[in-house]
Image (cartoon, rainbow, N blue to C red):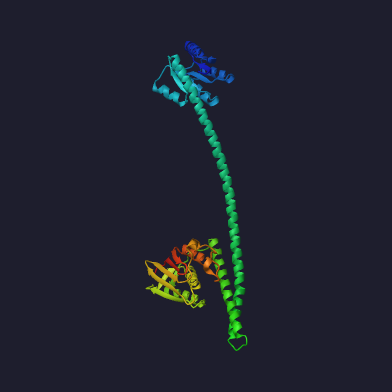
Amino acid sequence: MFSLKILITEDDTVSALLLKKALEKNHHQIIGMADSGEIALEILEKNHADIVMMDINLSGKLDGIKTTEIINEKYNIPVVYLTASSDSETLQKVAVTNPSAYVIKPFNIRELNMVIELAIFKDKKEKELQSLNNELEEKVKKRTADLNEANKELQKALEKERELSELKSRIVQNVSHGFKTPLTSILSSAQLLKLYAEKDHPFKAKLVKHANKIENSVRNLNSLLTSVLFFGKADADKMNYKPVRIYTSAFLNEVVDMVKAGIDNNVKINLDFDKLPKMITSDMDLLYQILENLLSNAVKYSKDGGNVYFKVRHENDTLFLQIKDEGIGINEAEQSQLFDRFFRAKNVGLREGSGLGLSIVKKCIEVIGGKIDFKSKVNKGTEFFLEIPAKK
């Protein structure tokens, strides 16, 4: 067994000497012997001890328990109690001070050595555990501080992103609105050119041809600006569901008529409206965006003289819609990108478009609380299936 520096605190001189002799026989160094708590504390003030042997009953004002409390607080040295009593009341008082061990008098050398070894081992492990706890607490404090700092930086970044998003939305809206006024003037001028060309004029055919080009280009650009404005609102979280009462058949026919007005490839739109209620409740603007974009795409990507089928039925406060074409279809490898902004399939050829229409449809469906699905095959066409909440 390794040598220890030991302080003996025992008010019975005979017991103290016997204990000293037993400890020295095991090569321990006795740094002092005290018969009171006060003397024990004076010795510890001047000398280092590895362990204190402490009698519970001492001659001074401080008993062994109170003296141990002071040693624990001030020196953090393991204490082994020496007691002639093993009653529960005494053991309860002893336990409060968290002793390293205790020895019942009279003791034998073997028992004493074992208790001292256990006390030193227990103290060592407790100090290692405390050290680990302290280290862990420091790491937690540091990580917490780092996390708080990271949160501050994240908040700054989010605030900056919000400001940039608002700025982008304002720029998009201002620029788009700025374009719409001159575009309206250009469109009016093109329509006037067509009107003048109806009279006998040597360049009548050319005037009509170029007026149509101007008119189509303006409509396409106006559609693009409308789409950009739409996503400006969407990105700024300014899109809300605003339900109103809608005359069902009149609204659906109005959308179809608007799409028909732009047809230039002789595509026929076939309608199948099954037992629709006179009125429904939904967001008219969002519903218009959904149907106009899907029908326009169906017409645009159909073959000349082809057919588009538009079927609508109402059941359980829900509109079930199908829009089917027999056009170019979508390659299976690209179908996962269909609703992405600015996505255009590789097979669209020279057909004009921004790639925003279906992403607008998807966003409107989300806001309106509906569902959308589709199936498509190259050169066979595409069919969209929609479910839109619409109470009578």
Residue at the outermost front position: 379
Residue at the outermost bottom position: 200
- The answer to whether residue 347 shows anywhere in this view is yes
Decide: is 352 above or below 125.
below
Number of numbered markers: 0
Q: In this rendered view, identify the residue nearer to me: 8 or 151.
A: 151
Q: How far across and down, in percent of the image, does residue 1 sit? A: 50, 18
Q: How far across and down, in percent of the image, does residue 281 sit? A: 43, 69
Q: Residue drawn 59% across and 51% down?
A: 156
Q: How far across and down, in percent of the image, does residue 80 sit? A: 48, 20
Q: Assign the C terminus to one quadrant of the image.
A: bottom left
Q: How far across and down, in percent of the image, does residue 90 sit? A: 42, 22
- The answer to whether residue 240 shows anywhere in this view is no
Compared across the picture, whether 23 is left or right of 390 comes to right
Q: Residue drawn 45% across and 20% down?
A: 102
Q: In this rendered view, identify the residue nearer to me: 60 or 249.
A: 249
Q: Residue drawn 58% across and 74% down?
A: 217
Compared across the picture, whether 113 is left or right of 180 comes to left
